Amino acid sequence: MNILIVEARYHPAISDALTDGATKALQQGGALFRRVSVPGALEIPAAIALGARSDQFAGYVALGSLVRTGALHFDLITQNVFYGLTRLSVDHGLCIGNGIVVASTEDSALQMAMKEERDVGGEAARACLAMVVLAQRLGEQT
């Protein structure tokens, strides 16, 4: 199965930790994958939608980080990113593992992303693979 990893590079160290966890989990799951980068988390749903139009991928892993700034801008971006991913999953039946970290500081986001702490990237990849298997069992994909 082919999986598309979409990683937001706004916080590079966090993105690297998320991607390390996700790629390891996908390799362990026997999946093939392709990685693409986007500037920030807001672009992740659009990149997944573009990938879906290509009919090359069975699932998608969304990776990125949103660090609280206290501004309304942060809340708008966070809500729209998660809403966009949910709409893609529900409206289009896409199998998406959500590995977007939301934290109050970059340090806490990095701790969540790192395998020793939580391995959010790996969790997202495993969720994606589980949804692909479910879709196959339900006859949604081959």
Image: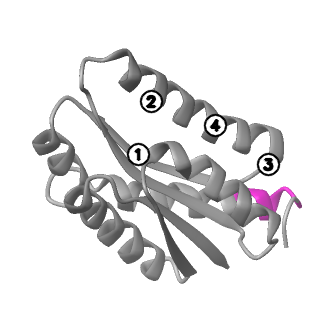
**Could you tell me residue 46's position as x and y percent?**
65, 50
Answer few, some or many: residues within 10 Å of disc 1's Cα (few below 14, many 20 plus, some between 14 and 19).
many
- Residue 133: tell me if it is visible: no
For the N terminus, the quadrant is bottom right
**In this rendering, position of residue 81 left or right of residue 94:** left
Q: Amino acid at mark 2?
A: Thr
Q: Residue at x 27, y 67 (%)?
A: 16
For the C terminus, the quadrant is bottom right
Q: Are the residues at dot 3 and dot 4 in contact (C-beta closer than 8 Å)?
A: no
Q: Residue at x 61, y 41 (%)?
A: 85
Q: Amino acid at mark 1?
A: Ile
Question: How far is disc 3 from disc 4 in space, using C-alphas?
Answer: 13 Å
Residue 93 badge = 3
Residue 100 badge = 1
Q: Are the residues at dot 2 and dot 1 in contact (C-beta closer than 8 Å)?
A: no
**Residue beneath label 2, please?**
78
Find the magenta span and give its range: 134-139
